[in-house]
Image (cartoon, coloured by chain):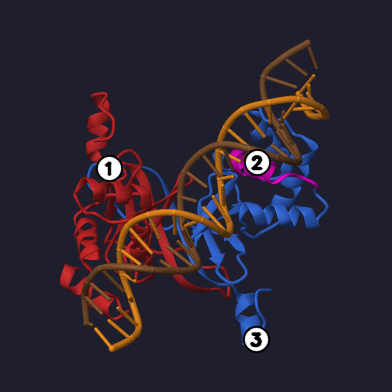
Chain colours: A blue, B red, C orange, D brown
Amino acid sequence: MNKRDIVELLHQQKFRLTREREALLDLFVRTDKMYTPAQWHEVAQRENVRIGLTTVYRLLEVLTKVGLASPFLVEGNIYYAFCEEHHHHHFVCLQCHSVEDLYECPSIPAAPRGCRIEHHKVDLFGTCERCQHNSQRGAKHQ
Amino acid sequence: MNKRDIVELLHQQKFRLTREREALLDLFVRTDKMYTPAQWHEVAQRENVRIGLTTVYRLLEVLTKVGLASPFLVEGNIYYAFCEEHHHHHFVCLQCHSVEDLYECPSIPAAPRGCRIEHHKVDLFGTCERCQHNSQRGAKHQ
DNA sequence: TTATCTGCAAAAGGTTTGCAACTGA
DNA sequence: TCAGTTGCAAACCTTTTGCAGATAA
């Protein structure tokens, strides 16, 4: 999904593409890691995207609502990663926090009798190839 | 898994079975819903289990660490449900917040090349049979 | 006896809200 | 033009911590 499509999708929700949001969206789209709101804010600052923490929260809220961002609860912290619309399967590296989308869908176990399933979530957690190599050499994170 | 086994498991972690914890554990074991820490505290009060909120947090922490409780992030809130050790698949009713364990394990999608998977999480979200019936009659929650 | 646990109160963090100024459509 | 957005500060909530007294083992 490219930026054009994303903006289109957001426009349908009375969403205005401000300078701040455009810069933040750019950053999201090309970052394959999950970060907490505060961390996204930090990353943005570092990339010279001047934006308030409140605005980060508000954008994450909108993106999550339309399915473009996915929250992950890891060790008590809530991280957000950008992801394709309606795609809920991920591999999360617990060391460097990178998130990779999985396109294969597992055969979901049968729901209990009579239950109606609205959505499901399959997340794999582990160590990515790069972090395995790095940790062999004693390095931390990337 | 019965209470005896649970206490055994917890004992291995230098865990002491105090009056407060025993009462709270009893409550957990027979409750098939997820609640936030504050809600567990409330439920406990209602059942005449006199216990501080801090203690609820501390017990949830211990239980989560040994795999007897599972946190769920739903609409920005963190809920905890009691569950069998090392059993990570669930059906969660988004209306009444009941949680059912699923014993069938799906074929997990292949991890990205070179990644080592440490654990995975499969959660189904929807509406349980009872809530479907209730909502047809205009009732809310149970 | 003593390491662990409890509840309270306070501190610390994280998230949301109110508001006046600003801006995209 | 004006509904939606921004950043700040304050409010709000959730979670953690310090501590003195209690207690399981």
Give me the chain letter of mark 1: A
Closest to the observer, B47 or A127: B47
- Residue A97 in the figure: left or right of residue A115: right
Q: Are marks 2 and 3 in contact (CB under 8 Å)?
A: no
User: Counting residues from the N terminus, which is met first, the one under dot 3 or under dot 1?
Assistant: 1
Query: Which residue position holds label 1?
Result: A115
Label 2 neighbour load within 10 Å: few <14, some 14-19, many 20+: some
Tell me where residue B134 appears, x and y as whole percent: 23, 30
Query: Residue B8, image x and y in percent?
Result: 22, 77
For badge 2, the amino acid type reads Leu
Residue segment shown in magenta: A50-63
Amino acid at circle 1: Cys
Q: Describe residue B21's horizontal placement relative to residue A83 as left or right.
A: left
Nearest-to-viewer mark from 3 and 1: 3
Report helix, strand or loop for mark 3: loop
Residue where numbered disc 2 is placed: A59
Residue beneath the point at 69% across and 46% down? A53
CA–CA distance in space, label 1 to label 2? 33 Å
As drawn, B94 above or below A89: above
The reply, left or right, for residue B25 in relation to residue A56 is: left
Q: CA distance from mark 3 to mark 1?
A: 48 Å
Residue at 65% across, 74% down: A141
Dot 2 falls on a residue whose secondary structure is helix
| Chain containing mark 3 | A
Residue shown at the point (21%, 56%) measured from the top left:
B27
Observer able to see residue B36: no
- In the rendered view of the protein, which quadrant contains the C terminus of chain A? bottom right
According to the image, label 3 marks what residue?
A138
